[in-house]
């Protein structure tokens, strides 16, 4: 649908007294030559051997970026996404005065997710009969759920969610979806 058609539909709705909601998205805003956009993409074996991880940061300047990590299946289907202010990922690097090179390097680093399997996770601690939450690691699963996931030897991706924090997600083949297995850090 082109911009003129969208504007015509919006104008017709407004003239009829209806509610008009503007949706701003790709293609509706002119490119800002003063902005900053950087990205990095890597192949990863997650739901299939040919999935892709893309780390992208956009903003009005390279020290004012929003960062998005996207994991897509080989066929382009969205498997997982995470977004944060880019300076959470690299404080002091992507803060005031950050350069395009620094932003590009940070996205290259962020796209280097760690790959492992659930079988590599530590067993549930005997001292934690209920929910597994320590000062540096939390999981949404109870002991039985966590141990079941470990035993299934499923693929896991871990990525930074901040300077000292990490999320790990696993690919549940039976459910056909990614799920958070734990988050760690401060």
Image (spheres, helix red, strand yellow):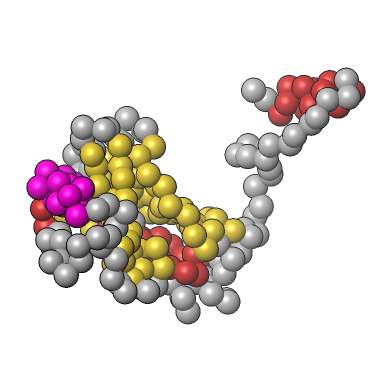
Q: Give percent across and percent down for residue 94.
A: 49, 72
The answer, for residue 117, to whether it is visible in the render is no
Q: Residue at x 43, y 62 (%)?
A: 104
Residue 142 belongs to magenta span: no
Q: Is residue 182 left or right of residue 150?
A: right
Q: Give percent across and percent down for residue 144.
A: 17, 50
Work out which quarter of the rendered image holds the N terminus and state it: top right
As drawn, the residue found furthest toward the bottom would be 92
The answer, for residue 104, to whether it is visible in the render is yes
Q: Give percent across and percent down for residue 50.
A: 23, 38
Q: Is residue 62 left or right of residue 124?
A: right
Q: Residue at x 37, y 44 (%)?
A: 80
- Quarter of the view holding residue 48: top left
As drawn, the residue found furthest toward the front would be 129
Q: Give percent across and percent down for residue 14.
A: 86, 27
Name the residue nearer the viewer: 133 or 153.
133
The vertical placement of 170 against 104, above or below, is above
Work out which quarter of the rendered image holds the C terminus and state it: bottom left
Total count of labels:
0
Q: Residue at x 66, y 52 (%)?
A: 32
Name the residue nearer the viewer: 180 or 111.
180
- Quarter of the view holding residue 129: bottom left
- Quarter of the view holding residue 124: bottom left
Q: Residue at x 27, y 32 (%)?
A: 176
Q: Is residue 68 left or right of residue 135?
A: right
Identify the magenta region. 143-159
The vertical placement of 86 against 39, above or below, is below
């Amino acid at each position: 649908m082109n911009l003129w058609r969208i504007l015509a539909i919006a104008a017709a709705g407004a003239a009829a007294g209806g509610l008009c909601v503007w949706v701003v998205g790709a293609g509706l805003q002119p490119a800002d030559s003063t902005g900053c956009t950087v990205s990095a993409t890597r192949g990863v074996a997650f739901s299939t051997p040919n999935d892709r991880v893309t780390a992208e940061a956009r903003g009005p300047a390279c020290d004012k970026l929003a960062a998005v990590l996207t994991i897509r299946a080989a066929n382009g289907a969205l498997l997982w996404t995470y977004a944060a202010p880019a300076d959470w990922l690299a404080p002091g690097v992507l803060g005031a005065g950050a350069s395009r090179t620094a932003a590009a390097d940070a996205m290259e680093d962020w796209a280097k997710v760690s790959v492992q399997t659930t079988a590599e996770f530590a067993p549930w601690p005997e001292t934690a009969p209920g929910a597994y939450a320590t000062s540096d690691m939390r999981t949404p699963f109870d002991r039985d759920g966590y141990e079941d996931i470990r035993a299934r030897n499923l693929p896991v991706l871990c990525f930074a969610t901040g300077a000292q924090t990490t999320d790990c997600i696993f690919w549940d083949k039976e459910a056909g979806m990614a799920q958070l297995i734990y988050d760690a850090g401060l």
